[in-house]
Image (tube, coloured by chain):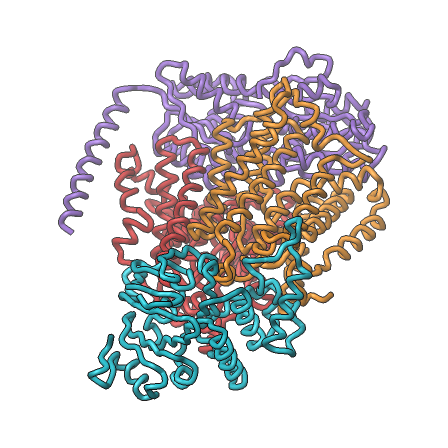
Chain colours: A red, B purple, C cyan, D orange
């Protein structure tokens, strides 16, 4: 097993071309203004938590389509539990997310269901349960402490939390045995099994981590928007996967890093932000993101092909 | 290393120069910049209002309209509004995707001293305090009007069903609530025996309509469809099943809806004109940008009922 | 090159990104000759075999069939020249049954262009029974079959269609002693029929027993060619390790 | 025949499930068996079903096609735009969208089989591209064809023996694709591709060509579904007809198609489509709300997938 970090320059200039994008953005009015940077930080922070979880799941060779639905469930759970205090609300969200991740992981490991379809089923069920519980209505009635969590000056609290989570995830992946094991499981599950790793348990833990992070992202989003909405996050799994992939994670597992995921996240966030500042109509924004994803996987495929088998 | 350093220094200089140029330009031009946050440019009514607004803005000297679309994502709308605030627009127009979720973003705009005009739909109560005004139709009132139309059509009694929009959207929730309250206010004996989502999709509306027929048979007398497309699609199913007597009331006054009324498929709808909506919003926006106040805070555009009696007075705009 | 050779490989090199897997290898196989290709793991044996069977093209060099230069873009091209391969991995589609695998890529069809499943099943059954009379339950996905049965399918498929050159990549690696002996018998039988065989193996004893000539690869280079009946185990092993013959007179090429 | 048979003879329990459901449904709700409702249930499956047939073939080949929902939207919009009042262009309004769908499939296929791109991400990228392009084309507005030609309208609205033409079109496709997959060289090669692509290649299968063809078929079928939508409703809000790829994927999986390739049958997908249609229809008749319907869908999908993986693990 080989865990290689691409050289930093390659990471920042090519995969993804983050620095060139930032340089180009310099010519866009208002990109470097404090207000805009704050908005940018705010808009990527909830997705950032999810990208971290998604990256870990992908490193271990899985995928999590349920993150958007779990995010909605986490926000709703937190708001519902808020009358009991902010700590029970946060714990409630984390536990709800963890349970849903546990179920996803169980479907994937014990029942040997393809992760894509297992988490698709979880997505549908979690979304249905959340919509049923709320009768499809947003849950309101937040107290000021909770709302303050969605603010923060000059940097949003959510952004600081995301940075802390990313650092923790980085340490977990690179400086703890658990992270090594995750890479090993993703690279070659059978080999990992034969060397005595508890493959199933590790995978379930990955999904639980992803679920808990998604639910916590839901809590932060609820604080930012002042409401627990059951319909948030329909596009989240796709944008999170895009950021993770752009950052070097692979759908075959065993590859990817938190630093890469952060770069991917920043790249997608900046791209959308720049297009917004330039007033690019949303139709073309969608096409740009789609075209970029398409081109990226084609290039990835061609590069893989050039390697010896 | 030294090369890249040189490059970055050069870029920084260029950036600074362009930044200075931009600020001085903005100061010199004194034009009114109208920021407009939209829920989804893929939704026909929203797209029509936006197009009308941008077209009208182009015709006015010194007015620029900047539109951002949230693509149906309430988190993105919050960021969009923040982006417009950062751009220091002179007035902010907001068509909210979720009346609650926009409130914190609106607070930011209000804190920055930017007057806010809600367009086409209203934020929740907490947000309404922050508004300089509201201009547009009213989803809730549309539900009430639908109640009146159905009450007229069914002479105050009978069973109806609702074909809803997408679950969880405020448009859907408000129209349903408006219908229920409207029927109650009229002391109508009309009962609601079913409601199902069609997701704004006329194909699903046909499936739902058939299921209503199967479930309720002759009992079903009327249907409230939350847009004209799903209404017309349901009416086609009823007609094909020999139940052309079921009164279908749509929402929106679209070209398709008017045609369905003319063809005798639908009983009625109410007009919701994107050009009226856009023109009124633009007038108010310019007023607000110049520091004036609106005479009325809530300015609901006229939403006349349309039935076969007066359908020819309307041409349909979207 | 060699007169009457079935196939000549001339100056074959293969580059994967920065790795040079083969460096100018020459090799030829005559009808009715068993040529063994030996060497360490990573010496380039399998790469050479895969080039000859059309899995990928060489970076430079030439493949000649019957003296004429040819270019293979896919395994089906190699098959057109009656070159068949039994891969180490067997190259069976696990989800398909034996007849489907047997005829994969050259299915029999009815007059109307549909698959002639009945005829394919019959022919496959016959061909497999030739190799192993007990092997009759063939219409199951091959994933459910034993290693020997799977091997039988791969072998039967390779020799059934007018093969002239048969490439066998580690044919006995996954087999027990009994089945290994059967493969040996098969090789002798095919040689008697005038079929050329390129045998890739790391089992030197096997090679000495079965091959006419032994060709040694090391780090992608051809380091020696020996005649099987004139050499012994020590000499071959030494050449594999040192890349050179003991005897200075018989120096490499 | 047990589960231990070859993929084109793999017997899935979806047909008995369908039978049990239909009996159960008629017990739960008397009017379920009324001819009008049966016709409606049959038709309800058609559009998703046609998309699901294409999805099934791509899945058997071992890949995904998540761009089909966007292709449905594209084709529905194009068909309406191409069907002007004079009605002379009926053939064009059908063929051009289908050809465009085939082109989208071709690009997907090239990316996946020629360039080796991951099919899930590539086709999601394609989905964004196509949806963005279609919305830009119509500026987010309604598209409508007021006087569509009779033939075009009759595609999904005219009936024979009380059943809409589109149902016969679907049945015809199910039969044609079943024969194609079980009894032609192409079909056999698609199964081989999904079983082990490298083995198929070494056995002489033209994997790139075969793989691209699966995507072209999927694209054309999705486009045909879009054309039928245009014929069914005549007026569209483009964003309202999004997302057909997930129900199609669900149906394929429910019908026993393996997500790792090599296993599945078009006819079983059709049965699964009707299983879903019956469940949805009954729940709508009984006025269960959308969230409950979502939950039930999720449970059914999980149960089905768990069942199939258990069955495969056993064999």
What percent of the width, then of the height, locates residue A209? 48, 62
Relative vertical location of residue A305 with respect to residue B197 in this rendering, above or below: below
State the residue in front, C238 or C113: C113
| Whether residue D239 can be seen here | no
Locate the C terminus of chain B by quadrant: top right
What percent of the width, then of the height, locates residue C57? 37, 58
Relative vertical location of residue D235 with respect to residue D104 in this rendering, above or below: above
What percent of the width, then of the height, locates residue D230? 63, 30
State the residue in front, A42 or B257: B257
| Whether residue C117 can be seen here | yes
Question: As drawn, is A293 to the left or to the right of B246?
Answer: left
Relative vertical location of residue C28 with respect to residue B30 in this rendering, above or below: below
Residue extending furthest top?
A: B313
Residue at image x 32%, y 45%?
A154
Rendering quarter of residue D154: top right
Residue at image x 51%, y 27%?
D138
State the residue in front, A171 or D113: D113
Question: As drawn, is C153 to the left or to the right of B27?
Answer: right
Rendering quarter of residue C253: bottom left
Residue at image x 14%, y 47%?
B3
What percent of the width, then of the height, locates residue B230? 67, 30
State the residue in front, B80 or A156: B80
Give the total of numbered labels: 0
């Amino acid at each position: 097993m080989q865990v290689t970090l691409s050289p930093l320059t390659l990471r920042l200039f090519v995969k993804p071309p983050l620095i060139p994008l930032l340089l180009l953005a310099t010519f866009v009015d208002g990109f470097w203004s404090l207000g805009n940077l704050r908005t940018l930080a705010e808009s990527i922070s909830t997705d950032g938590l999810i990208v971290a979880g998604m990256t870990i799941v992908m490193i271990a060779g899985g995928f999590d389509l349920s993150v958007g639905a779990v995010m909605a469930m986490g926000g709703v759970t937190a708001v519902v539990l808020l009358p009991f205090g902010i700590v029970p609300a946060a714990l409630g969200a984390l536990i709800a997310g963890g349970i849903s991740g546990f179920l996803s992981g169980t479907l994937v490991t014990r029942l040997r269901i393809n992760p894509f379809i297992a988490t698709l089923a979880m997505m549908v069920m979690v979304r249905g349960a959340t919509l049923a519980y709320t009768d499809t209505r947003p849950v309101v009635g937040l107290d000021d402490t909770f709302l303050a969590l969605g603010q923060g000056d000059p940097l949003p609290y959510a952004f600081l939390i995301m940075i802390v989570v990313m650092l923790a995830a980085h340490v977990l992946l690179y400086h703890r045995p658990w992270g090594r094991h995750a890479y090993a499981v993703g690279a070659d599950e059978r080999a990992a099994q034969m060397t005595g790793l508890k493959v199933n348990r590790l995978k379930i833990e990955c999904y639980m981590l992803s679920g808990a992070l998604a639910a916590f992202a839901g809590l932060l989003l609820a604080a930012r928007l002042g409401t627990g909405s059951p319909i948030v996050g329909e596009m989240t799994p796709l944008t999170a996967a895009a950021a993770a992939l752009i950052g070097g994670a692979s759908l075959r597992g065993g590859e990817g890093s938190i630093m890469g995921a952060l770069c991917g996240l920043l790249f997608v966030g900046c791209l959308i932000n720049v297009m917004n500042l330039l007033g690019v109509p949303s139709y073309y924004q969608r096409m740009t993101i789609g075209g970029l994803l398409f081109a990226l996987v084609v290039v990835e495929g061609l590069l893989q092909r050039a390697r010896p088998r | 290393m030294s090369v890249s350093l040189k490059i970055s220094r050069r870029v920084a200089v260029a950036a600074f120069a362009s930044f200075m140029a931009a600020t001085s330009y903005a100061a010199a031009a004194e034009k009114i910049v109208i920021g407009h946050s939209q829920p989804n440019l893929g939704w026909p009514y929203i797209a029509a209002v936006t197009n009308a607004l941008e077209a009208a803005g182009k015709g006015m000297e010194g007015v620029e309209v900047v539109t951002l679309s949230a693509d149906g994502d309430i988190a993105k709308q919050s960021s969009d509004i923040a982006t417009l605030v950062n751009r220091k627009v002179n007035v902010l127009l907001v068509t909210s995707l979720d009346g609650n979720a926009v409130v914190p973003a609106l607070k930011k705009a209000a804190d920055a001293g930017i007057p806010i005009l809600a367009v086409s739909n209203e934020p929740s109560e907490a947000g309404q305090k922050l508004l300089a005004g509201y201009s547009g139709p009213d989803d809730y009132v549309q539900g009430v009007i639908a109640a009146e139309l159905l009450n007229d059509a069914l002479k105050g009694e009978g069973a109806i069903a609702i074909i809803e929009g997408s679950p969880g959207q405020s448009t859907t929730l408000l129209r349903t609530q408006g219908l229920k309250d409207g029927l109650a206010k009229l002391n109508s004996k009309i009962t609601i025996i079913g409601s199902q989502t069609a997701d704004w999709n006329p194909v699903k509306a046909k499936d739902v309509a058939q299921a209503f027929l199967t479930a309720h048979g002759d009992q079903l007398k009327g249907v409230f469809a939350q847009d004209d497309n799903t209404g017309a699609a349901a009416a086609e199913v009823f007609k094909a099943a020999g139940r052309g007597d079921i009164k279908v009331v749509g929402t929106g006054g679209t070209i398709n809806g008017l045609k369905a009324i003319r063809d005798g498929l639908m009983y009625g709808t109410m007009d919701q004109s994107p050009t009226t909506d856009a023109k009124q919003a633009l007038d108010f926006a310019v007023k607000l940008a110049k520091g004036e106040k609106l005479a009325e805070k809530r300015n609901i555009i006229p939403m006349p009922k349309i039935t076969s009696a007066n359908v020819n007075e309307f041409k349909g705009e979207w | 090159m060699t007169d009457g050779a079935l196939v000549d490989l001339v100056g074959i090199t293969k580059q994967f990104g920065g790795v040079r897997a083969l460096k100018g290898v020459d090799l030829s196989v005559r009808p009715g000759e068993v040529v063994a290709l030996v060497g360490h793991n990573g010496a380039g044996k399998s790469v050479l075999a895969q080039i000859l069977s059309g899995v990928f093209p060489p970076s430079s060099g030439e493949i000649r069939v019957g003296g004429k230069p040819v270019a293979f873009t896919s395994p089906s091209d190699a098959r057109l020249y009656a070159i068949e391969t039994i891969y180490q991995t067997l190259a069976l589609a696990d989800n398909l049954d034996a007849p489907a695998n047997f005829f994969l890529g050259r299915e029999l069809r009815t007059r109307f262009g549909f698959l002639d499943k009945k005829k394919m099943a019959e022919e496959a059954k016959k061909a497999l029974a030739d190799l192993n009379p007990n092997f009759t339950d063939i219409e199951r996905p091959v994933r459910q079959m034993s290693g020997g049965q799977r091997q039988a399918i791969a072998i039967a498929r390779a020799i059934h269609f007018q093969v002239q050159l048969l490439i066998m990549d580690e044919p006995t690696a996954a087999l027990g002693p009994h089945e290994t002996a059967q493969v040996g018998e098969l090789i002798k039988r095919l040689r008697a029929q005038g079929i050329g065989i390129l045998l890739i193996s790391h089992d030197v004893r096997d090679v000495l027993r079965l091959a006419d000539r032994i060709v040694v690869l090391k780090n992608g280079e051809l380091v020696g060619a020996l005649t099987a009946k004139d050499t012994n185990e020590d000499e071959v092993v030494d050449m594999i390790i040192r890349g050179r013959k003991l005897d200075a007179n018989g120096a490499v090429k | 025949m047990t589960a231990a048979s070859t993929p084109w003879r793999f017997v899935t329990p979806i047909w008995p499930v369908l039978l049990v459901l239909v009996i159960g449904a008629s017990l739960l709700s008397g009017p379920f068996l009324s001819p009008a409702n049966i016709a409606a249930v049959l038709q309800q499956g058609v559009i998703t079903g046609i998309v699901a047939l294409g999805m099934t073939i791509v899945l058997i080949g071992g890949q995904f096609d998540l761009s089909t929902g966007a292709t449905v939207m594209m084709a529905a919009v194009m068909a309406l735009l191409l069907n002007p009042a004079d009605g002379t262009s009926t053939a064009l309004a059908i063929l051009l969208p289908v050809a465009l769908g085939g082109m989208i499939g071709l690009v997907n296929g090239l990316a996946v089989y020629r360039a080796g791109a991951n099919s899930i991400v590539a086709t999601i990228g394609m989905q964004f591209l196509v949806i963005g392009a279609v919305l830009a084309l119509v500026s987010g507005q309604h598209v409508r064809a007021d006087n569509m030609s009779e033939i075009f309208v009759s595609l999904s609205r005219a009936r024979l023996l009380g059943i809409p033409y589109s149902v016969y079109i679907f049945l015809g496709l199910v039969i044609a694709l079943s024969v194609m997959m079980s009894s032609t060289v192409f079909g056999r090669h698609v199964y081989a591709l999904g079983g082990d692509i490298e083995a198929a290649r070494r056995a002489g299968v033209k994997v790139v060509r075969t793989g691209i063809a699966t995507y072209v078929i999927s694209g054309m079928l999705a486009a045909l579904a879009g054309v039928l939508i245009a014929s069914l409703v005549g007026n569209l809000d483009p964003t309202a007809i999004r997302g057909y790829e997930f129900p199609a994927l669900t149906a394929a999986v429910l019908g026993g198609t393996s997500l790792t390739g090599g296993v599945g049958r078009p006819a079983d997908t059709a049965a699964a489509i009707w299983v879903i249609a019956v469940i949805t229809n009954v729940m709508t008749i009984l006025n269960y709300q959308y969230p409950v319907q979502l939950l039930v869908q999720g449970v059914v999908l999980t149960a089905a997938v768990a069942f199939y993986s258990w069955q495969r693990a056993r064999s």
